[in-house]
Amino acid sequence: MLARARELGRRTIEGLLRLLYPPTCHVCGDRLPEGRRMGLCSACWRTVELVKHPWCAACGRQLERKEIVDPRGENLCLDCRLDPFPVILRGTARYREPLVKLISEFKYDFWSSLADQLSNLFVERAHALFGSWRPDLVIPVPLHVKRFRWRGFNQSLLLARRLAAHWGAELAEPLARTRNTIPQVSLPLDMRLTNVAGAFTVTDEPSITGRRICLVDDVSTTGSTIQECGRMLREAGAAEVRAYVLARP
Ligand SMILES: [Zn+2]
Ligand SMILES: [Zn+2]
């Protein structure tokens, strides 16, 4: 209820602001083309660095030149050669500017209408990154209820909804975050897995058993959250778990 009221308030304020100030690009400040309410102009949008083949076949990270063994086939990054990432993970773009700024506004400043430009890109790249693979279920990484109330929306759910529609898969939310963890971005890398350990619970096990699942999140840096959610889903009987995020380092 509160979330809906906040969403309505935000849309009203956005509408008023658009009348007073025509929308401009978040990066260069140029006027945006007619019909686009926010985001980046075409020139700045082209500076978003997509993850392009070859990426790591396990963790999806963009490979450095020295890590590429077979330019046409599958390759693993140096980390995954030692200890392969347990969930097949793919990311749309590299977590660098201007995407860092865009995602932090999408996430923390309530500008949920940025979601259009970001989720379009997310959906458009899915085919290149997953080929013909399709899940039965698309599941967003959940926010803790307290953070959801404060933010008013779950950015991962917005992405997951679009992706599920694109793939003709079911959208489900059978995971809950039971512990309000410290935001991963504010923690040193070696503390992130312990920060999310035991933070999630499966609320609807029958919906998971035997299904192929794609987990969705906005950013994955160390992959700890994806790893933990993947573990929960597999324990609940998922046939296969892969994950797709908007940004990877
Ligand atoms: Zn621009
Ligand atoms: Zn890797």
Image (tube, rainbow, N blue to C red):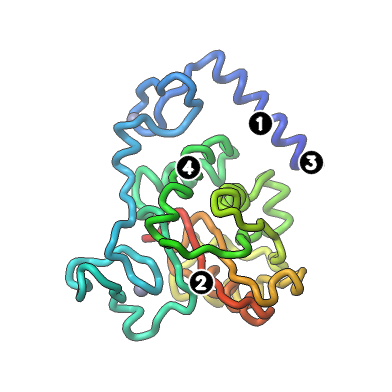
Q: In the image, which disc is placed on residue 2? A: 3
Q: Amino acid at mark 2?
A: Ser
Distance CA(mark 1)–CA(mark 4): 22 Å
Mark positioned earlier in the residue sequence (1 or 2): 1
- Labels 1, 4: front one: 4
Residue 217: image location, x then y, percent: 54, 58
As drawn, 195 above or below 122: below
Q: Quadrant of ligand 1?
A: top left
Residue ID for mark 2: 224
Q: Secondary structure at mark 4?
A: helix
What SS does tag 2 mark? Answer: helix
Kind of element beneath mark 1: helix
Q: Amino acid at mark 1?
A: Arg
**73 vs 107, nearest the viewer:** 73
User: In the image, residue 24 lies at what x, y percent?
Assistant: 42, 24
Image coordinates of residue 134 in percent, x first then y, are 52, 63
Decide: is 103 above or below 12.
below
Distance of label 3 from label 4 (alpha carbons): 28 Å
Q: CA distance from mark 4 to mark 2?
A: 26 Å
The residue to which callout 4 is attached is 120
